[in-house]
Structures are given as structure tokens and as C-alpha cells.
Image (cartoon, rainbow, N blue to C red):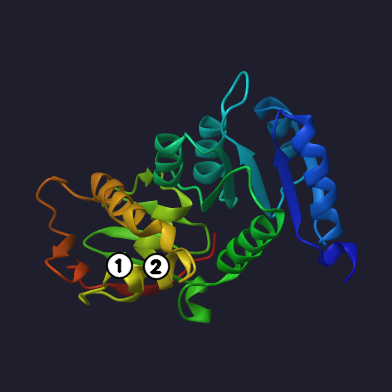
Amino acid sequence: MTIEDQPTVLLVDDESSLREPLAEYLTRQGFVVHEADSAAAARSRLLEAVPDLVLLDIMMPGEDGLSLCRHLVETRGIPVILLTAKGEAMDRIIGLEIGADDYVAKPFEPRELVARIRSVLRRSTKSGGEPESEDLLYRFEGWELDPLKRRLSDPEGSIVAISTAEFRLLRAFCDHPRQVVDRDRLLDLVQGREAHLFDRAVDNQVSRLRRKIEADSREPQLIQTVRGGGYRLAADVARAARQPD
């Protein structure tokens, strides 16, 4: 494998005693690793090059990892794995809700971390649907989802910001309109079966998505809950050819 083929990881952690040996280990495992000791340093790194994945510590001085995570998933679409302390359960939940792809609690086994990195990278390269659908737009009830640009437009044509996780979830529904999709199937379509830790996060992501596309998220009409079954996009979905920019 040439260096051009090696996945690039940005490792963001203020503890040099963890960051430096972990960077060396990941390099031996075939990754190109760039380091940053703060969110500010990570933002500077991102101006130079966009990594394939970010390993991000939550607790850092200055801007914390959750704030940087939100920026990464909403504006960059970069996969993120959070590095958390064992007692940070609420931070992990918040991280998953804003679109982080996975988390690993410190102290962790480096081999497990490598397995999780490779799993997230595999998921991020999946199209999630028919190969040719990247060139098509999904349209339903006046909404338009652009898979290529990962952009959602409301019926008035305004852009609605969605996270990477929300995009994947909505695309899964658009690929299976009016079908009941249970949580396990959503995990297959959105996160991969190995992501059993995301069971609760599926419901959280559905709630977040509803707040963005429903007239009243408390009485959803588009994304309906099917008791004992899962969820259903209660709309017909049309696929339209992309117009030249």
C-alpha cells in the first residue's frame, strides 16, 4: 500500500502521554496520523488537509471536543470517533446525538480502537443505496435531499443543516419509502451491524430529524413510529436527475 492509499487520521488530544504513543501505534497499523493538542490546532490542521477520520478527545482546555465534533459533522462531513473517560456517559450520548460515529472509553485497548476506526471508515465509504443514486435527487412532500452534496432543502428552497448521521438516516428512509424499517435494519443501513452501541441513538437521531422536517415534531406525519416495528417514511419519494450547476 502506498502512502496515497493509507487512511489519514487526525488525532486530537491534549494529553501528550496518550497522543504520542497512540499516534506511533496507529502509524504502525498502516494509518497516516496527524496530531493536534487542542481544538484550535485541529482547526488549523483542517485548513491544510482533510483527514479520512478524526479521533477526538472530549475533555480539552479551551474549545471542548463536543463543540469541535458538532462543527466537523455539520460542516465537514468527516467521520468522528470520540475518546472519552469512563464517567462521561452523558457526553457520549450528546456526542452520538450530534453525529459522532462511535466512541471509545479510556483506558482502551489499542487493537479495539483500530477495529473501530476501520469499521467506521468502511461505513463512510458505503453509498447506502444504489450506486447510481449519487447522481439523483430524492424529492418528497416538497423536500429535496441531494446525496452527492449531502444537502437538504425545505419546500421553500432553503437549506436545512443536517449532521452526517441525520443525512444517513433520512437517506435510508428515502431508499425505503412507506416501508416499516426496524431499528436493527436502520443500524444495517446507517451504521453497520457491528454498531450495537447505537441502539438508543437511533431513536435520538429520529427525534432530531423530526424536529427539522416535521411541522410538529410531537405529532409527526412524515416519519411515523410503528409500534413494535420501527419507523416508516409516510411519503412517496421521487428521484429526479441532477441539473447542471
Residue that badge 2 annotates = 187
* Marks 2 & 1, CB-CB < 8 Å contact: yes
Residue 124 image offset from top left, x and y in percent:
57, 63
**Can you tell which quarter of the image residue 42 is in?**
top right
Counting labels gives 2
Does residue 48 appear in the picture of this structure?
Answer: no
Q: Does any portion of residue 13 appear in the rendered image? A: yes
Looking at the picture, which amino acid does disc 1 mark? Arg
Residue 222 x/y as whole percent: 18, 60
Q: What is the C-alpha distance between the residues marked 2 and 1? A: 6 Å
Q: Nearer the viewer, residue 60 or 129?
A: 60
Label of residue 92 in the image: none
Counting from the top left corner in percent of width and height, residue 91 is at 44, 35
- Which residue occupies the foreground of this view, 69 or 77? 69
Which quadrant holds residue 37?
top right
Out of 23 and 51, give the one closest to the viewer. Answer: 23
Q: Nearer the viewer, residue 175 or 237?
A: 175
The residue drawn where x is 82% and y is 67% is 5
**Helix, strand, or loop for circle 2?**
helix
Residue 183's disc is 1
Q: Is residue 122 above or below residue 98?
A: below
With respect to residue 52, does 187 lie above or below?
A: below
Q: Which residue is depicted at the point 58% across and 61% down?
A: 120
Coordinates of residue 208 in the picture (x, y in percent): 30, 46
Residue type marked 2 = Leu
The secondary structure type at the circle numbered 1 is helix
Q: In the drawing, does residue 92 fall left or right of residue 82?
A: left
Horizontal side of residue 117 vs 224, given as left or right: right
**Mark 1 Cα-neighbour bin, 10 Å: few <14, some 14–19, many ≥20:** some
Q: Residue at x 58, y 49 (%)?
A: 81
Quarter of the image with the N terminus in it: bottom right
In the image, farthest residue toward the right: 2
